[in-house]
Image (cartoon, grey):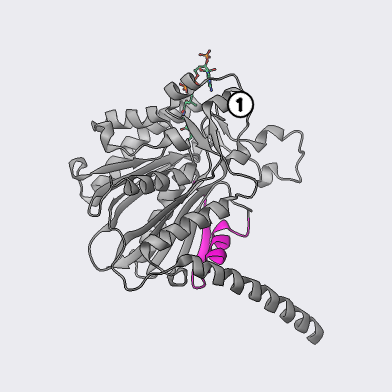
Amino acid sequence: MPYAHITGWGMSVPEKILTNDDISKMVDTNDTWIQERTGIRERRIAGENETTSSLAVAASLKALKVANLRPTDLDLVICATSTPDYIFPATASLIQDQLGATKAGAFDLLAACSGFIYGLNMAAQAIRSGSIKSALVVGAETLSHYVNWKDRSTCILFGDGAGAFVLQASEAPGGVYSAVMHSDGSGGDLLSLKNGGIKFSATSDPIVHENKRYIEMDGNEVFRFATRVMVQATNEALEAAGLTLDQVQWIIPHQANVRIIKAAARGLELPMEKFVVNLDRYGNTSTASIPIAAVEAIEKGQIKSGDKLVLVGFGGGLTWGAITAQWTGPFPSKGTVRPEQYRVLGRFRSYVRRIIRFIEGLLYRREL
Ligand code: UT7
């Protein structure tokens, strides 16, 4: 059975920074409260021309470059997101097209902030089953569009960004070892974004549904749930992999609130030094938070090839899950792949295909 190795990684965040002081000019809050209660100092906010797919493509190109893998070698693109560019086409298909990943299937996955864990598991399982050889998993969000900037209990938390992993098959042991995924839909109302679904669609009454355009959250209940499931999911994934906590070098948790991560550290009886934390600079980027934290830890030289990791997340649904993996790094390969060039070719190919489709349409109509 092949193993699913993580061989490439990349991240992309908007340039625009929104500090706690900036938010204190919009709602009744202050930097001290936000830092003490969440650990967040600032977050990134998408500019006018930045979308979930554009951040995702930028992160994916970096991940492909690290893996030294051509976009045309990808078999599958999964985009975990709660803020797709459209309901359909899937953001994953936009990414596939813009990368020029001509052989890849593509789909979006919605499991709120746990989406990256779910997506990574789906891609790893497809590789381990032998049905595909390589996959791109992206977590990407532009949550700022759905934040109610008048609600101080939520607007302090969220930020925009994207992170991507490339997975490749190899007979050498390593990569993703185990995964657990859970859901408890009875807690769906604790964290929700109802906008866009058919119950609150554009054809529904826009005035009645005004407040459904935004993220709604019962912060205390989500906090209580999160501290419980982070410990539970970590232990379950370790048991499934036959690993013990002392064999693990790094825990990469969903970056929601540093107090949740500290509670998980206490619950697992681990020092905070074992946890990758960067939410002070990005806030909660939902599906992007785990890969962004991982990418920064690798680039800082913290995570090294051979290290054993636990990735653990939770979010709306309610959903939660964890993955254990051994960090691999790029496979040795000949030559240097420039994914950016494939992107240019991909754009050209996409343009030509649109023209051919248009001409075919005209000819077909004439035949009728
Ligand atoms: O991806 C999953 C996403 N969600 C989460 O992970 C959220 C988990 N929950 C949390 O992170 C925390 O519950 C929050 C950060 C949302 C809130 O922190 P808290 O320590 O649980 O505060 P609280 O809601 O219990 O509120 C305490 C007080 C209240 O005032 P009173 O009633 O004690 O006078 C709030 O009105 O703090 C007040 N408060 C604020 N004050 C200043 C709430 N938000 C703010 C604010 N600035 N932004």
Residue 312 appears at what percent x and percent y?
A: 36, 42
Locate the C terminus by quadrant.
Answer: bottom right
- Could you tell me which secondary element the residue under label 1 belongs to? loop
Q: Is residue 101 visible?
A: no
Q: Which quadrant would residue 346 be assigned to in this image?
A: bottom right
- The magenta span reads 88-111
Q: Is residue 345 visible?
A: yes
For image coordinates 57% across by 54% down, the residue present is 54
For image coordinates 71% across by 45% down, the residue present is 201
Locate the N terminus by quadrant.
Answer: bottom left
Identity, as a three-letter code, of the amino acid under mark 1: Asp
Residue 83 appears at what percent x and percent y?
A: 58, 47
Q: In this rendering, would 17 be left or right of 332?
A: right
Q: Is residue 261 above or below residue 331?
A: above
Number of marks in picture: 1
Q: In this rendering, would 359 be left or right of 297?
A: right
Q: Is residue 66 magenta?
A: no
Q: Which quadrant would residue 305 be assigned to in this image?
A: bottom left
Residue 154 appears at what percent x and percent y?
A: 55, 29
Label 1 environment density (alpha carbons within 10 Å; few <14, some 14–19, many ≥20): some
Q: Is residue 108 magenta?
A: yes
Residue 38 appears at what percent x and percent y?
A: 44, 27
Q: In this rendering, would 179 be left or right of 212?
A: left
Q: Which residue is mark 1?
A: 151
Observer-nearest residue: 198 or 111? 111
**Which residue is the extreme one toward the bottom?**
367
Observer-nearest residue: 137 or 31? 31
Q: Is residue 355 above or below residue 202?
A: below
Can you tell me whether the CB of the residue at mark 1 lies under 8 Å from the nearest atom of ligand 1?
no
